[in-house]
Amino acid sequence: MKTPEYSGNLRKNIIRMPESIEAATGIRVFGRLLKSFIFTTDVAIIRNCNADAVIAVYPFTPQPIITDAIVQSTDKPVFAGVGGGTTRGPRVIGLAIDAERQGAMGVVVNAPTSNVVITGIKASLEIPIIVTVVSEDTDIHARLRSGSAVLNVSAGPRTAEVVRKIRAQHPEVPIIATGGPTEASIAETIEAGANAITYTPPSTADLFKGMMESYRK
């Protein structure tokens, strides 16, 4: 049976997650089943998409005011980046504590984050720690022992391959992974063992470009 849908007149023009993500098992966090994670900090996009959750990671030192703005602006669970690359040590733990207090459902740390820092975050938080994995050379056992609850695999065009290798050794570990730009690449990543998919949406500039072209016709 087809799922009924109400879109309205003004809000039907939203960013929709690729349909192939529906085949994923999802990851249940505090009772909520999450299959699609939109990878953005753009509040306008977050408010106008059908993703299950937000993964808010950006290439600057994390700032609590940014996490707070995103959490307050959406009805979706937010998984907030708290550093681990440029930003290291006790500051990462402090940022993670702030993120939980602001209402984030989870925190995301970058691949260079030390296991000592992950252990420190785990001792301070109730919400899950998502650790980014960029290659199959990562010591997954050590990450899990340190307190990682979920792996976030982001290995570029080799993501599906890395997911497959991790899944072979860790059948039960929850895995989020970048699915790539096509339905086929997303399906391959899910088949490899990803439970959920991160999706990078088009930018507001790209969306405006298409809209303005249609206005000019």
Image: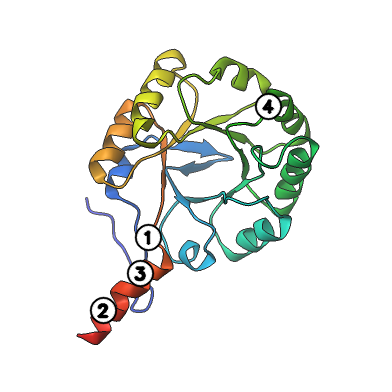
**Which mark is drawn over residue 213?**
2
Q: Please, what is the three-letter code of the amino acid marked with disc 3?
A: Leu
Q: Do the residues labelled 3 and 1 touch (CB within 8 Å)?
A: yes
Q: What element carries label 3?
A: helix
At which x and y percent is residue 124? 78, 35
Q: Which comes before the other along the chain, label 1 or label 4?
A: 4
Asked if residue 68 lies left or right of residue 180, the reply is right
Residue extending farthest front: 86
Mark earlier in primary sequence (1, 2): 1
- If the image is split into quadrants, where does the C terminus sit? bottom left
Circles 1 and 4 in contact, beta carbons < 8 Å: no
The disc, 2 or 4, on the residue closer to the chain's N-terminal end is 4
Residue to which mark 1 is pinned: 202
Check residue 114 in the rendering and tell me which mark sits there, or answer none: 4
| Spot occupied by residue 113 in the image (x, y as percentages of width and height) | 65, 31
Q: SS for tag 2?
A: helix
Three-letter code for the amino acid on which mark 2 is drawn = Glu
The residue to which callout 3 is attached is: 207
